[in-house]
Image (cartoon, rainbow, N blue to C red):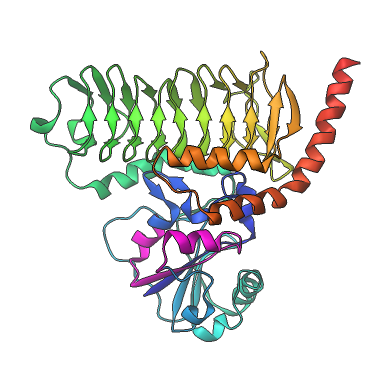
Amino acid sequence: MRICLFEDHSVFDLEPLTLTRPVFDLLCGTSSLGQKQGRYFRPSAAGAMVRPCLAPLLREQDPHLPVNDSAWLGLGPVVMVNGRWLPPADDGGFVLVPFEPCLGMIGNEVAWAVVEPEHLIGCTPLTLPHLLDDWKQTLPWRQAGGQMIARPWDLIEQNRDSLIADFQQFGAPSSIAKRPNALSVVGPEAQLWLDPTARVDPQVVVDTTSGPVIVDRCAFIASFTRLEGPCYVGPGSQVLGGKIRTGTTIGPYCRIGGEVEASIVHGFSNKYHDGFLGHSYVGEWVNIGAGAHTSDLRHDYGEVIITVAGARVTTGCTKVGSFIGDHTKIGLGCLLNTGTNIGVFASVLPAGKLLPRHVPSFCSVKHGNLAENDDMEELLPTAEEVMARRGIRFTRTHQHLYRAVYAQTEAQRREALPQAEQRRWARSA
């Protein structure tokens, strides 16, 4: 069986997280959506169909992956898998995929489609939405199960259950004999999985009362840290005297301190010092300064409204923190308001008060005021230096992608900046 992970138009409703990566690379639980889809179908081969600006980066990351390759699609039957689909929990069995063309649906959305080469004639990222509409009209439907990730906060809402479901992928729990003597476990011992290469200092408390705690390879847990399950500490990450609350995923090579609750830190990001991060998703290469705090609950306990892709959206949730794009810097002492959306390559400095809830990509906040931050000759070398410090090479492909994202988000800046100026003049008057 072959599968092809694709993006539909709704990826724009997941900004800023999808500005710099395919939607199936977003984390939920201990792995990405794409990895979960791969485990669900267990394909013999896989390809991808993504936005054209992302295709060069995927090819660079995996030269063997067919990306936007119509010839590969035409080689035989294929399961087209929506990259926003969070599959149902894996029970360890094999999924019986129909041999005949059909659609796996969640509501009116296509989660996956079993199709033949004749269904994929002329299939490109631009024509795929029309093909999906045609398939809805012509192919039989069946229930796909699982969830569709429609908005950034959906990942946070689903993360706790995904962590619990993913725990079985890690095999037998850690042997008590191999655990550090000074590691204290509160709750079922069998709910702790500790990689043999992980380092755990004395005076660490692991609480598995509400779910599993997973510490992956080469991670480091410093003294006076508390890990509350379900939670996950990814490969090479460091938790430095932190309080990691339930429902938290820490991706690879992060440095985390302070209090983190029900949040996802994608990878290669720093929140080294004290400060609160709650019900939030932090992208890659983000730095959050000492004493920065994220509000995730309104004082009136009302529904949180957030700006996504330039539009105000009701979340249906009472707890929503911040969504922060790649290469963004949050200064020490910043106070992020409930339901904040900060784009990529943003710079946010403290103002002694709650900061704007919407900071478009390539913008800065200084003294509480929003301004454009468009000096690419300064931003890109900084990104290169940050990545080099973690042993990751900044390539021309990254540069072209970030310039494309700058152009793509120009309209959001044009709309947000005059509005911010009007509010500033109204306050001063």
Read off the magenta span. Answer: 36-64
Q: Of 187 and 116, which appears nearest the observer?
A: 116
Residue at x-position 61% and y-position 44%: 16
Residue at x-position 61% and y-position 69%: 125
| Residue 112, magenta (yes or no) | no
Q: Position of residue 363 (x, y in %)?
A: 70, 35
Whether residue 75 can be seen here: yes
Q: Of 110 and 420, which appears nearest the observer?
A: 420
Residue at x-position 54% and y-position 57%: 397
* 137 horizontally vs 226: left or right: right
Q: Residue furthest left?
A: 177
Q: Quadrant of the N terminus?
A: bottom left
Q: Position of residue 355 (x, y in %)?
A: 68, 23
Residue at x-position 28% and y-position 30%: 220
| Residue 44, magenta (yes or no) | yes
Q: Residue furthest right?
A: 429
